[in-house]
Image (tube, rainbow, N blue to C red):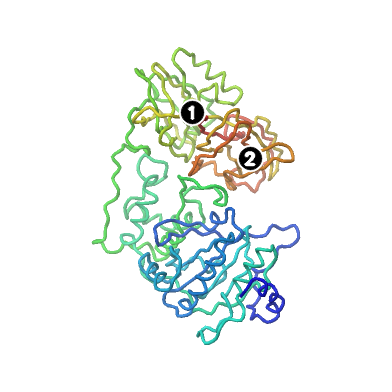
Amino acid sequence: MARSSRLAALLLLAATAPLAPARGGDRPAAPGEPAALAPEFLLEASDGTRVSLHAERQDRVGTVVLFLDEQCPVSARACAAIARLVADYADQGFTFLLIDATADCDAKSAAAFAKANGLPEPLLLDPQNSVAPRFELARGAAAVVLDRELQVVYRGALDDRPADGSAHARHEFVADALEALLIEEAPAVAATEPPGRPLAASTRAVTFHGDVAPLLHRECADCHRPGQVGPMALLDFDDAQGWAPQIAEVTGNGRMPPWHADPRHGRFQNERRLTDTQKALLARWAAAGAPEGDAKQKRTPPVYDDGGWAIGTPDLVIQLDEPQPIPADGYVDYRYELVDPKITEDLWVQACEIRPTARDATHHVLALYIPPGKSPLSALSGLQDGSIIGAGYFAVQVPGCRPNLYPEGAGKKIEKGAKFLFQLHYTPNGKATSDQCQLGFKFCATPPKDEVKTRGVFSYNLRIPPNEARYVTTASFTFPKATRLISMFPHMHTRGSAFKFEKVSGKGDDAVQSVLCDVPKYDFNWQNFYLPEEPVRFAAGETLLCTAAYDNSKGNPFNPDPNRMVFWGEQTYEEMMIGYIDYIEEK
C-alpha cells in the first residue's frame, strides 16, 4: 500500500479493525505520570551474538519485535509480510528483532527456518518462551511496535489476513503503526489478537549436569570460586544444589550478575548479564528441586591456574609488610602503609588487581603511586582536595569490584625506584581478624604508545537532609586537552542510589548533553567499572558531568540512620560523591 493511501486509510482502520479486549498494559499514562518502558530482554541470536532490546533503541525511530513459531503454519505464512516490512522500513530508522519462540529451538533450527522462509538473519532464540508473556502475547505470528522512548504503541497481529491464509489482508496493522511513528502520531489501532498457535515454554527436564553446570562454569565461576569476590563457590553440584532457590531469585530479579548500567545508554565491553533463556533455565532447575541429572554428563569444573587472581597469574605481586589487625567492632580510622617493591627498571602495567586477605572486613584499598625521590607526604597532600591527581591514584579495591584493566597499546607506568602507599579502610564485622592485602600486576609485552591517567570528578559539598529520599548533587570536569575516556567508576556509600556520567558539548543555550553511562540502581556492595566498547572522545574544552542521587529515607534498607544530616566523610555511615575515570590524553 502506498504511503499516501495508507495515511488516508487510518480513520477507516480505527473504525473497522478487530480490536482485542482492553488490557492494563495499553492504558495511557496519567498526566504527570512517566510512561512505562517496554520490558527489557536479552537473548542470544542464532549467530551467537547477544541482543538487548533497550540497547537497540539508540538513535532509532522505533523498534518492532516479532514472535514466530517454527511449528506454526500461520507464522510461516507471515514471513513474507515480515520480510517486506524489513525491506520497506529498516532504512527509515526502525530496528526489527525477530524472535524464534519455538519450544527448545536452537541456532541450527532457527537458521533453517529463516532460510526456508526468506527471513533476514539472525533470529533471536527464546526456547523458554520467556519474552512474549511480558508483552501480554500468547500466540505466534505476533508483533509489538515500540516508539523511540520504548513505549508500546501497538501489539497484536501483523495484519488482518485470515489465519488460514484464504484471503488477502485489508489492513496492515504493523505497517500503519510505523507510518504513524514517522509522523509522530499514535497508531489508529493499539491492539489486535494474533492469529498464530499458542506459544509454549519448553517442557524438557532441566538438570545440573546437562544444563546448569555449563552455564555456571561459563558465566559465574570466575567470581564464584575460592579466593574471588563471590560469597560461595559454584563449581560443582555439591556447591550449587543448596543455593538453587537463591540462585534463581537473584538472577531472576537482576541482582546477579552484578551489573547496573542502563542498557539504553552506552555499550560496554565488560558487561555482565545473563540472557532471559539462561535465567529461565536456572528458575526451572530450582523449581524442579535442583535435580543432578545423569552422572555420565558430569563436566569437569574449569581449572584456574592463577592462584585465585582474576587477572591471571601476575607478573609481580607486592603486599603489606605486616598483617593489619582489624578489631571485632568499633570504627577503624584510615591507615597508610608504605611498601617498597624494589623496582629496578621502568615497567608498564596492562592490568592490576588488589586482593585483601580479609575481604569481608575491607571497605576499600587505594594503592597510591609514589614516584622515585618523592615523599609519601606528597600523596597525602594530594588527597586533601579529593582530586587524587596529586595523590597518584594507581589502583582500587572496593566491594564487588573487578580488576583495573587497560586497552591494548595503553598502560600505566611504574618508574624505577617507585614505591606504593596503601590507603586502608576497614569496617569491623563482629569478628576480629587481620589483613595483609596484595597488589598484583600484569605488564605490557612492549612499551605502549599511550599512558593511562586517572582522575576523580567529585563534590565535597554534600548536605543530605534527614529523611530525604531524592537528594541530587553534581560535579564536573572540563578537559584541557583532547582526550579518550576508557573507563568510568562511580563511588558513593550506602545512601547512594543512582549515578550518571554525561558528556557536555557546547556552552550556554547551545550546550548538548549525552548520557555515557547511567547507573539507576547503584549498589555499594557491588561497585563496577564501566569500560566503553569504544573510547569516548572529548575535544579540548568539552566537559564530563557527573550526577549522583542519594536516598536518606527509611525506605532505603541500607541506610544507617535516616534521621541524620549527612556530610562528606570517610566512614561508611557518611557519604562520598566521586566519579573516577581512566583516560588517555591525545598527543
Note whether 334 is above or below 133 in the view shown: above
Splitting the image into 4 quarters, where does residue 567 fall?
A: top right
Look at 61% across and 33% down and name the residue there: 576
Q: Amino acid at mark 2?
A: Ala
Q: Residue furthest top?
A: 373
Residue 400 screen position, x and y as percent: 47, 41
Q: Secondary structure at mark 1?
A: strand
Instruction: Give amino acid for label 1.
Output: Leu
Check the image and name the residue furthest to the right. Answer: 31
Q: Is residue 170 above or below residue 485?
A: below
Mark 2 → mark 1, Cα distance in angstroms: 22 Å
Q: Please tell me whether residue 439 is drawn above or below residue 500 in the rendered image.
A: above
Task: Report the residue marked by disc 1.
Answer: 366
Q: Residue 525 at x, y = what percent?
A: 51, 42
| Left or right: residue 521 compared with residue 318 | right
In this picture, residue 339 sits left or right of residue 552: left
Badge 2 density bin: few <14, some 14–19, many ≥20, Cα 10 Å = many
Asked if residue 355 shows in the view, the reply is: no
**Circle 2 residue:** 548
Label 2: element kind: strand
Say whether marks 2 and 1 touch (CB < 8 Å).
no
